[in-house]
Amino acid sequence: MSYLSIRNLSARLKGRPDQILRRVSLEVAAGEVRGLVGESGAGKSMIGKAILGTLPQSVEITGGQIILDGTDLLALPAAQRRTLIGAKCALIPQDPLTALNPSRRIGPQITNRLVDILHWSRADAEKRARDLLAEVQIPDPERVMRSYPHELSGGMRQRILIASAFAAEPKLIIADEPTTALDVTVQKQILKLIAAMQARHGTALLFVTHDLGVVSKVCQSLSVLYAGYVLEDSTIPEFFHAPKHPYSRALLAATPKYTDPDGSLTPVSDAVIAATRAEVEAADRSAHV
Amino acid sequence: MQFLQSVLLRLCTTLITLAGVAVIVFFVIRVVPGNPIAMMLPPGATEADVARLTALYGLDKSIPQQFLIWLSGVVQGDFGTSITTKQPVLQLVLSRLPATLELSVMALIIAIIIGGFMALTGTRLRGSKTEAAIDIGNGMALSVPDFLWGLILILAFGVLIPIFHISGRVTPSLPLPFSTNFYLTESLLRLRFDLWLDIAAHMFMPALALAIPLAAIISQLLKQSLKETMHLDYVTLARTKGYSETHVILREALPNAILPTLTLVGVQFTFLIGGTVIIERLFSYEGLGNMAIDAVINRDLPLIQGIVILFAVIFTGVNLLVDLTYAALNPRLRHA
């Protein structure tokens, strides 16, 4: 039984016919790390937002289910859905520079979920925050908890956000391009940290990224998204050795290899894109009959 | 240390501003036509009478000479004597200041309550008909100036449904036990709620008339600022933690969204104080503004000067206060 199971999820911009998500189905087992890859605009972040209930107001879900731990989130009243997500899921956001509230100290930003939503005592929550900050290798957690975000570096802030995501021991974490906004040197450390934290806590992780290199290092399985449509659903070895879809093959060919840094890159050809688009549209038509 | 330095610097620039205001006012009111002596004397006064009075008030000297005499008095805290009432200007002005301050602050509080409520409601219900209604209301409130709102309020709540007083500061027959002129504040401190109610009922309509345009500005600015903040990542992150929309608006977005609004409210508040001049006249409210109009009509030069300087002091004081509040609310400035 998967911890998260998305079935035939469709979404579109309000009042527009074109779909952002087309009958997306994907499963994340408990403790599994699944990559969600696709080019920008493919809808990969939208899936994360749909799960967490943070879709922009302009987007409406037109069908499907998001089943979290046996409960269909979309069938719940808004308030219940919010508290359920707050207790069982967490987000590691993309940009650590904008994801912390500039006018509040770090401590309350980590403990607020525990105190307000999960009704922990303040002392317990603060102890938990200190332990977590130590776990993500932040020196002097006491001082950091009293700091404001602008007093800390980008790498530090991303560590804090990771610690904060694990605060309530969620069963599922959605990491939305968590390294994209960081320096290359910091990227690697953060990636390692996320992988280590995931392994230690046994959390399921949905890793949204456009970087196949990152996927190969962190994930066990992946879903390839194109124009809001899941083209391929494979384990990591399957995907890197025998990708099923022509678009996946083209995507792999377009990724720089660490083993061959000077090798030539082949951009995804127009023919592959046209064929993929035709396939997605054909699938759309057959779904509407 | 740095904080103290910046405050001192601000005080210095404030002094220069005040000196500039003093020079301009002093010269302008002497250059424009109109003569206080002519206003004082009955028709048929002789040339000699006019000359004697002119010399008595020092108006026969050259304008720069008059300015120096006035300035040397001001430095010693003597703003001269009012020509019409024969009382010291400083005493007159200070006796009226509390009335105007209470009115302005009351108006500001009303504006913040109405404007803040509208902004928060509009943000909570963004995209709905309620938000559209708030926008239309803001447009209407802004397109009508405060004195017209005053007239509208007099017609509505003074004439059609007479529930508020339309004139004065307090019912004249009531005995007043006050030792200061801050009637509203003092009645509250003395727990004289009967008096407080009477004074508040007098103050309510002029304060509301002053507050309506400012409330619209606060509502518009704060709502815009809140809506921009609501798209930021830390707000989204708070949502994923399980917080309600209302909590997210009040706790996450508001403390940050309020900063740009605060600066503009400071500027707008000085306009509101300027608006008291006509509003006080309209409601026969015994404040500085009302006194200023009388002083201008009577060409009471020392009194005009004193009132203008006092207004200038209030304006610069408000601006300083806004800057300090801004620094206190914004941790990025506090630690920088």
Image (spheres, rainbow, N blue to C red):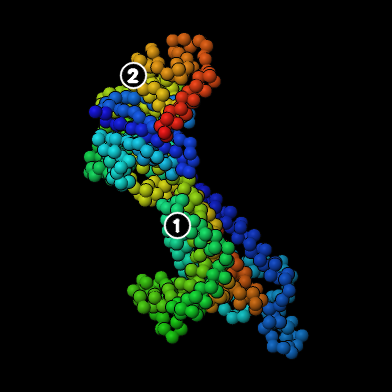
- Whether residue A241 is visible here, answered yes or no, is yes
Residue B172: % across, % down? 46, 84
Most distant residue in the bottom direction: B44
Residue B74 placement: quadrant: bottom right
Residue B27 placement: quadrant: bottom right
Residue B219: % across, % down? 48, 57
Residue under the point 47% across and 48% down: B227
The 10 Å Cα crowd at callout 2, few under 14, some 14 to 19, many 20 or more, is some
Most distant residue in the front direction: A289
Residue pointed to by mark 1: B130
Q: Does A281 sit left or right of A9 as displayed?
A: right
Residue B263: % across, % down? 51, 53
Residue under the point 54% across and 52% down: B10
Label 1 vs label 2: CA separation?
50 Å
> B331 above or below A5?
below
Residue type pointed to by label 2: Thr
Between B271 and A273, the one lying in front of the other is A273
Residue type pointed to by label 1: Thr
Q: Does A100 sit left or right of B292 as displayed?
A: left
Between A272 and B52, the one lying in front of the other is A272
Determine the secondary structure under disc 2.
strand
Residue under the point 48% across and 31% down: A41
- Whether residue B237 is visible here, answered yes or no, is no
Residue A17: % across, % down? 48, 39
Residue pointed to by mark 2: A235
- Badge 1: chain ID: B
